[in-house]
Image (cartoon, rainbow, N blue to C red):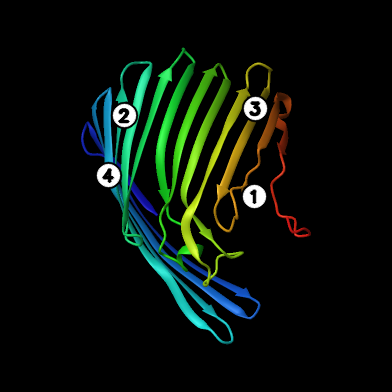
Amino acid sequence: NTSYKGVLNNSWTIETGLSYTFADTKIGVFSSDINDVENSAHAKLKLRKRFNSRFKLSFGAEQFITDFKENYKDDTIDATYGFNNNITAAFAEADLIFSKKLALKVGLRADYSSLFSTTDIAPRAAIAYKSSKNGQFSLAYGNFFQNPNSAILKFEQNLKAEETSHYILNYQYINNGKIFRAEAYRKDYDNLVKFDSEFENFDTNYNSSGDGYAQGVDIFWRDNTSIKNVDYWVSYSFLDSERDYRNFETSAQPNFATKHNLSIVGKYWIDSWKSQVGLSYGFSSGRPYTNPNTNE
């Protein structure tokens, strides 16, 4: 992995990078041997122009290259399969500062996938308003695309890029060592991969008909000045999420999601010991699961 950042002149800057990954994974399952080999590369170039203190423009391009092969071997089968995918992307982003209180960021990204022979367009925007000396509101929207992972693409390439749309409202207050942050969000998912077997397999039927959503609230408070030598913070999140994807028969809460999460952390500095003691507490509500002892 290598990167470079430099100044071309007083108003132009350049950022560029190149990375290469080689991964060789060998797995034994009973009498079967599975060997995955992936070669991938990522190159990116970004230029930034500062026109004045109120307007900045960034634009560039990037290239992703993936070559994935899997070999499955047992007493009767010796098969090699996989996929190649090249993704070419171009993007542009503008920062506009209207006043000391109001700023806007807008962007557009286009991705072309050689595997799917499709071009995905993703607009994004965020606006921030300084409501007081220490407080700020922001509102953001964005579209994002992501290919299915290699566990699926190695068996099926007649799919679509998975898509999500984000809507985020944020408020932040910072004053004299105190931070309060509250965020509400909604995320809609489309083109999620569905299949008709218990796990991804070579004879599984795949499609891109899945969808879902996630919405919730995150609250964070931190204070390191009100009580001498004490730094503490409290965070709480509420998440309401359902997806109809993978082998789900209907929309349901995925098993990685928990509705309620609470975290409390406190630290006390003992100056004479030059040491710190801390205490943390975490709580999460239950996760959904399928009870193997019933047919429900």
- Left-right relation of 126 to 280: left
Q: Is residue 46 visible?
A: no
98, 252: nearer the viewer: 252
Amino acid type at circle 1 is Asn
167, 150: nearer the viewer: 167
Residue at position x 48%, y 31% in the image: 168
Q: Quadrant of residue 127?
A: top left
Residue at position x 49%, y 56% in the image: 193
Q: CA distance from mark 4 to mark 2?
A: 15 Å
How many discs appear? 4
Comparing labels 1 and 4, the label whose residue is closer to the camera: 1
Q: Quadrant of residue 296?
A: bottom right
* Pointer 1 with pointer 2, Cβ within 8 A: no
Comparing labels 3 and 2, the label whose residue is closer to the camera: 2
The residue that disc 2 covers is: 95
Residue density around tag 1, few if under 14, some if 14–19, many if 20 or more, within 10 Å: few
Amino acid type at circle 4 is Gly
Q: Is residue 97 visible?
A: yes
**Disc 1 or 3, which lies upstream in sequence?**
3
Quick one: SS at disc 2?
Answer: strand
Reply above or below: 199 against 49: below
Q: Quadrant of residue 28?
A: bottom right
Amino acid type at circle 3 is Trp
What's the mark number on residue 233?
Answer: 3
The residue that disc 1 covers is: 255
- Rendering coords of residue 49 (x, y %): 24, 34
**Disc 1 or 2, which lies upstream in sequence?**
2
What's the mark number on residue 60?
Answer: 4
